[in-house]
Image (spheres, rainbow, N blue to C red):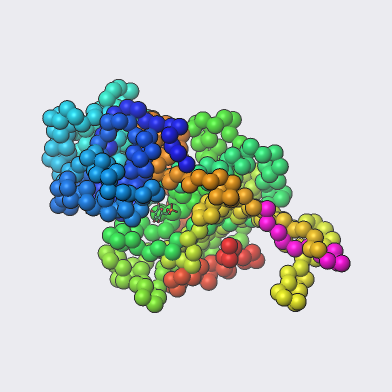
């Protein structure tokens, strides 16, 4: 999709703290490069990479060139890479050293070609955010709110590691920044298919009346990844785990969007207000007292695949979960009693993110469902309707319904009503980071998370820790769908594994 329609115009200097890290290589630089190629960046822009490793500008440019060749959505040819590299600088420094920030600020003072508006991107671990903003402020890198040149600060997730740390971080940041300058990023909100959840629910009349406890049996949300620890991520992930890395932000956002009430407008405040109501009503399911509401797993050794505990910079006796499955419920009028199952994991069978809303079977079973393999047919009760939001890959939405199978008998079969982005639009979907970086450049916070929203997310996570206290991760085979305990968690339903 061309981003030409939307463009940032004001000159800007991006400073990426954590510029040698995995996120910068795989997502941030490729997104900036695509925006550059699409002419969506301002004419005047500079990107300064800040990290500890010893590089000069040229070496940094080579490193980023290699990353772009591997990860860019648009082809990274030599000529455009050369042009892009002319906008790249490297600033070596340690985040614990105030002098490194001072020398960075000196660059702004001494180099009149550096655009004075600045977008500081904190692609660093959450425990370094407070100090980084503090040092940046003391060095003069942060200009006052509501003035030009402006400063905006993008902060990566996870924002804190529990309610207490998130609250402290929110409060401390306000000593140096106005809330309007803080952009807490959750890249799932930048995904086209995630934005489509609200459009699909509220731009159509036929689905909304059945999105409630009367018609919905349960909801499953899965974010499965085949990757393990990408290079250098072991230490971060071992401190973080799947619950904080994925559930506390991405999965909760999906859950909110699929269950929230219609907002009274499409502005940030109205949408956030409805999401907040869901987060306040969300809790680990209490309805099935004798069964655990959560299952934690850790990937074991496989053929040619390290166990998590053998990964680089992971403790050999780590108890960190690389998989989690949860049974949650929303204690409100619309959803009370409807189980909501969440699961996410590394080294799973398939890369897939989807939301499946499974409806109740009809009250009266007039028909039988037939499934045939060759000449052998099996008759069972009618299958439930399921509405599936395919977030990635093969982006789209499909609805499973029952239809009469052509035969002399009145039996039905499950058929799909399928909408896929690639079938409908001959355009590649933009990457989430492209959209979000452009929004931040244009000063639009709609798709970023507000402080109270983040705190509410952590409140639920704290409740999950409490409800699952003492549970240790159980091993699962790489390439599987996680520990078998997760199947017991969802019984009598089943996870949708063969999608
Ligand atoms: N990777 C991903 O897919 C995603 C990551 N995120 C978030 O992005 C953030 C960064 O993640 P990721 O890139 O994976 O992490 P990495 O561990 O790969 O990178 C961390 C970066 O921080 C720098 N760094 C660490 N300590 C210091 C220090 N004392 N002084 C200066 N620089 C330092 C490192 O550079 P050096 O060693 O050279 O100093 C490196 O560039 C995290 O908050 C993560 O949750 C969010 C979504 C996806
Ligand atoms: O935030 C994160 O997301 C990625 C998965 O993102 P996706 O867009 O590929 O679904 C995950 O690999 C990473 O651990 C996590 O920090």
Which residue of the protein is positioned furthest toward the right in this rendering? 408
User: Which residue sits at x=25%, y=36%?
Assistant: 46
Q: Main secondary structure of the magenta part?
A: strand
Tell which of 110 and 276 is nearer to you. 110
The residue depicted at 57 percent of the width and 30 percent of the height is 265
Horizontal and vertical percent position of residue 195: 52, 42
**Which quadrant would residue 445 be assigned to in this image?**
top left
**In the depicted view, which residue is nearer to us: 75 or 454?**
75
On screen, residue 419 above or below 296 = above
Location of residue 89 in the rendering, given as x and y in whole percent from the top left corner? 20, 41
**Rendered location of residue 149, percent (x, y):** 27, 25
For the magenta stretch, what is the residue range? 407-417
**Residue 289 included in the magenta stretch of the image:** no
The correct choice, above or below, for 111 with respect to 1 in the image is: above
> In the rendered image, is residue 427 in sight?
yes
Taking depth in this image into account, of 489 and 74 the one nearest to the observer is 74
Can residue 52 be seen from the camera position used here?
A: no
Q: Residue at x 61, y 61 (%)?
A: 288
């Amino acid at each position: 999709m061309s981003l030409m329609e939307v463009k940032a115009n004001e000159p800007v200097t991006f400073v990426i703290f954590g510029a040698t890290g995995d996120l910068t290589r795989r997502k941030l630089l490729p997104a900036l490069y695509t925006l550059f190629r699409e002419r969506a960046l301002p004419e005047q822009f500079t990107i300064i990479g800040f990290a500890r490793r010893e590089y000069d500008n040229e070496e940094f440019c080579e490193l980023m060139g290699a990353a772009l060749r591997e990860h860019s959505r648009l082809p990274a040819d030599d000529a455009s890479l050369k042009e892009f590299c002319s906008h790249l600088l490297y600033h070596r420094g340690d985040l614990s050293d105030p002098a490194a920030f001072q020398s960075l600020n000196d660059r702004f003072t001494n180099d009149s070609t550096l655009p004075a508006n600045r977008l500081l991107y904190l692609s660093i671990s959450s425990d370094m955010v407070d100090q980084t903003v503090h040092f940046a402020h003391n060095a003069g890198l942060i200009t006052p709110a509501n003035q030009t040149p402006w400063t905006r600060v993008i902060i990566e997730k996870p924002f804190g590691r529990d309610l207490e740390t998130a609250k402290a971080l929110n409060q401390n940041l306000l000593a140096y920044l106005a809330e309007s300058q803080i952009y807490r990023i959750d890249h799932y909100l930048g995904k086209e298919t995630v934005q489509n959840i609200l459009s699909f629910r509220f731009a159509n009349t036929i689905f909304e009346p059945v999105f409630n406890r009367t018609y919905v049996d349960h909801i499953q949300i899965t974010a499965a990844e085949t990757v393990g620890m990408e290079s250098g991520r072991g230490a971060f992930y071992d401190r973080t785990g799947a619950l904080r890395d994925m559930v506390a932000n991405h999965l909760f956002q999906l859950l909110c969007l699929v269950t929230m009430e219609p907002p009274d407008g499409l502005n940030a405040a109205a949408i956030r207000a409805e999401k907040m109501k869901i987060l306040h009503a969300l809790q680990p399911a209490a309805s099935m007292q004798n069964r655990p509401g959560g299952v934690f797993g850790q990937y074991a050794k496989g053929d040619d695949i390290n166990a998590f505990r053998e990964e680089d910079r992971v403790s050999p006796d780590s108890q960190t979960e690389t998989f989690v499955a949860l049974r949650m419920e929303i204690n409100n009028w619309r959803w009370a009693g409807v189980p909501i199952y969440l699961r996410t994991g590394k080294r799973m069978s398939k890369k897939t993110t989807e939301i499946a809303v499974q409806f109740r079977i009809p009250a009266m079973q007039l028909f039988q469902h037939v499934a045939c393999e060759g000449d052998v047919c099996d008759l069972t009760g009618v299958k439930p309707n399921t509405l599936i939001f395919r977030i990635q890959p093969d982006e789209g939405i499909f609805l499973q319904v029952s239809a009469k199978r052509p035969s002399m008998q009145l039996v039905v079969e499950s058929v799909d009503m399928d909408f896929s982005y690639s079938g409908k639009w001959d355009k590649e979907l933009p990457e989430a980071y492209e959209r979000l970086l452009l929004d931040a450049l244009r000063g639009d916070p709609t798709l970023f998370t507000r402080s109270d929203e983040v705190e509410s997310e952590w409140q639920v996570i704290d409740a999950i820790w409490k409800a699952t206290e003492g549970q240790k991760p159980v091993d699962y085979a790489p390439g599987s769908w996680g520990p078998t305990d997760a199947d017991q968690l969802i019984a009598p339903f089943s996870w949708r594994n063969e999608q």
